[in-house]
Image (cartoon, rainbow, N blue to C red):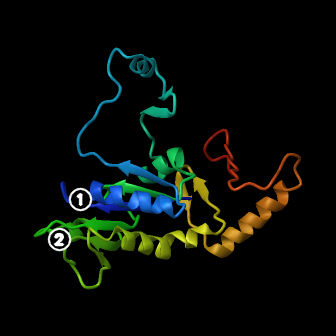
Amino acid sequence: MPLIISIVGYSDSGKTRLLEKIIPLLKAKGYSAGVIKHSGHEFLLDQPGKDTHKLRQAGADGVVLLSSGQISFLGKIDEGGGSLLDRIEQSFFSDRDIILTEGFKKGDQPKIAVLTKGKEEKLLQEIEGSIVATVGENPARADLTHFKPDNPGGLVRMLEDRFLKERKRIQIRVILDGKNIPMNHFVQEMVQSGIMGMLSPLKGFKDSRRIEVKILFPEKGAAK
């Protein structure tokens, strides 16, 4: 499962500039990265009169628009039992190493706060969950790891040492109606051993980097 890190801050604080700096550094280290950008304004990709709009009006729960090398999804994402970020990750970015979001102050995912002079403490008080670092000309709090905007390499090294290296081990994830069920390493190893023991004798089974097992019950409450 990917690591989700949210880059948060006020408008014109430098969030996009920071992402433009750290993404190539992560890629150079061999990590795959996706980005989710939060917009505070309504936007419309599906215009009335277009074929995609007609298909959605006909009742399609979602429409995928595919062209050479590009893909767009038009529709609503059902949050189900999990957070919106979790649902987006499961739908589009499940095979990435890290997902960087621009925005999303709320939620339990780790945050990097991009500071605006004179509004540092105000921003930190608005952020929900853990703040793993701040970025700006001057630190806001002595207890928070701080990086200047011209030191994206230091920030990437911190992310790698604190989060990404740990995630290179085998990962097991159980999702119930969109909600992740936490498991420690011992339980993950037990589940992995049991599943691999049952799957490995099957004809056509081979060593793979990614294995998915999905169970779809015909109706709610059938998991007994």
Which quadrant of the structure image shows residue 76? Answer: top left
**With 190 as the anchor, is 91 left or right in this view?**
left
**Residue 3 seen by the camera:** no
Q: In the rendered structure, find residue 69 and report the number of the disc placed on it.
A: none
Q: Position of residue 141 (x, y in %)?
A: 23, 81
Task: Give the label, 1 or 2, closer to the camera.
Answer: 1
Other-residue count near label 2 (Cα within 10 Å), few / some / many at <14 / 14–19 / ≥20? many
Name the foreground residue: 118 vs 222.
118
Which residue lies at the image location 19% right of the left edge and 73% below the top edge? Answer: 137
The percent position of residue 106, horizontal first and vertical second, equals 32, 60
Q: Residue at x 30, y 30 (%)?
A: 44
Q: Nearer the viewer, residue 115 or 214?
A: 115
Residue 40, position in %: x, y?
24, 46
Mark closest to the chain's N terminus, 1 or 2:
1
Query: In this orientation, does residue 194 appear?
Result: yes
- Give, as a three-letter code, the residue at label 2: Glu
Q: Secondary structure at mark 2?
A: helix
For this view, does 163 lie left or right of residue 103? right
Which quadrant would the N terminus be assigned to in this image? bottom right
Residue, disc 2: 120
Within 10 Å of disc 1 (Cα), the crowding (few <14, some 14-19, many 20+) is: some
- The amino acid type found where label 1 is placed reads Gly
The residue to which callout 1 is attached is 14
